[in-house]
Image (tube, grey):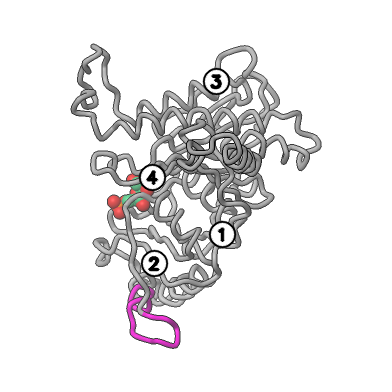
Amino acid sequence: MCISCCSNWQKICDICINSKQKRMVSVKTLGQFIIEKQADFPFSKGELSRLLRDIGIASKIVNREVNKAGIADILGGAGEINIQGENVQKLDVFANEQFIAALSAGGECCAIASEENEDIIHIKNEMSRNARYVVAIDPLDGSSNIDVNVSIGTIFSIYRRKSQNGPGTNEDFYQRGTEQVAAGYVIYGSSCMLVYTTGKGVNGFTLDPSIGEFCLSHPNLQTPKMAKTYSINEGNYMRFPDGVKKYIKYCQEEDSSTDRPYSSRYIGSGVADIHRNLITGGIYMYPTTSKSPKGKLRLLYEANPLAFIIEQAGGKATDGFNRIMELDMKELHQRTPLFIGSADMVDMAGEYMKKHSAVEKIAKA
Ligand code: P6P
């Protein structure tokens, strides 16, 4: 209530109330949006919508705990007993359990592949055994940043199962990224945002803690074709392929006609770096290194969902040579190099990779 209402509470109050009602009317929650967009999937009986709802619920619970992490000393650090006498879990274990619980209770997926679990998790209850979808998830990416209060994220990917019924199988997850029916991430940062696509554009929702709802804040996100930010752990420079080294030098050269040098921005939390680049433009690269000869990021629950989102926003995602979403899935925790972001920047990095990998191959031969 504004101060002026108190002085003349009847008349001004109506204005104040009307403006609040207008604000509420303009707010569209994730739930309302999902129902509205359900018409895009005439054959869907709402299962996909319920899956997204379940993920939204778990995200709110994880966000609440992530926000408290800073006072872990009071609550007790992971592995200790807190003041309530409860065993304090590591946040990535907690997050994993929350997403598994929400997806199991929702009954819309028959199996989950998680970064936290070596094997797939079969959802045992009767309702889920014959569910049509499987979910791949990185419950808390960048969790090493929790203790230093840096943004972290959850990444998820949804496929239709390939097996007919009964418990899900590994083969249900051995699908190319092009087969995803939905993908998204949650970023637990200065605000909590959920960004997702079902193949009809990318939309971002910001959690309003005062009403406990994700509200549409970034409709139809599109990423700039070209920008001036590159994200890579340059500490690995000596271990990079020559094409990456040459592209980094290109980014650093002085040339006002192409807005160079670019800015280097690397948070060490992929969801945070890729989210910033999605909105402002830029390229994120995690190439092969001598320490990670196949790359570090996982294809199933990191590269593919992020690639689906960035492509839907007009960007590109490759392994330096090939489109991420066309790579064959052969192992649950398969790693891949990742070049993702503004289309023209990914293309240029790819040209450097192509040009110098040929030279490298000849040198090694
Ligand atoms: P490095 C987090 O562990 C992650 O998978 C990405 O989110 C992040 O961009 C990258 O690894 C950081 O790895 O080797 O640079 O510390």
Q: Which of marks 1 and 2 is nearer the N terminus?
A: 2
Distance of mark 1 from mark 2, alpha carbons? 19 Å
Horizontal side, residue 277 vs residue 131: left or right: left
Magenta stretch: helix, strand or loop mostly: helix
Give percent across and percent down for residue 166: 64, 19
Judging from the image, what secondary structure is the residue with disc 2 in? strand
Q: Which of marks 1 and 2 is in front?
A: 2
Q: Please report the bounds of the magenta region as a residue range.
A: 247-260
| Residue at mark 4 | 189
Q: State whether residue 29 appears in this view.
A: no
The residue located at (55%, 20%) in the rendering is: 104
| Residue at mark 2 | 230
Q: State whether residue 163 appears in this view.
A: yes
| Residue at mark 3 | 104
Decide which of 94, 295 is in the foreground and name it: 94
Q: Is residue 2 above or below residue 350?
A: above
> Residue 323, which numbered label?
1
The amino acid sitting under disc 3 is: Ser
Crowding around mark 4 (Cα neighbors within 10 Å: few <14, some 14 to 19, many 20+) is some
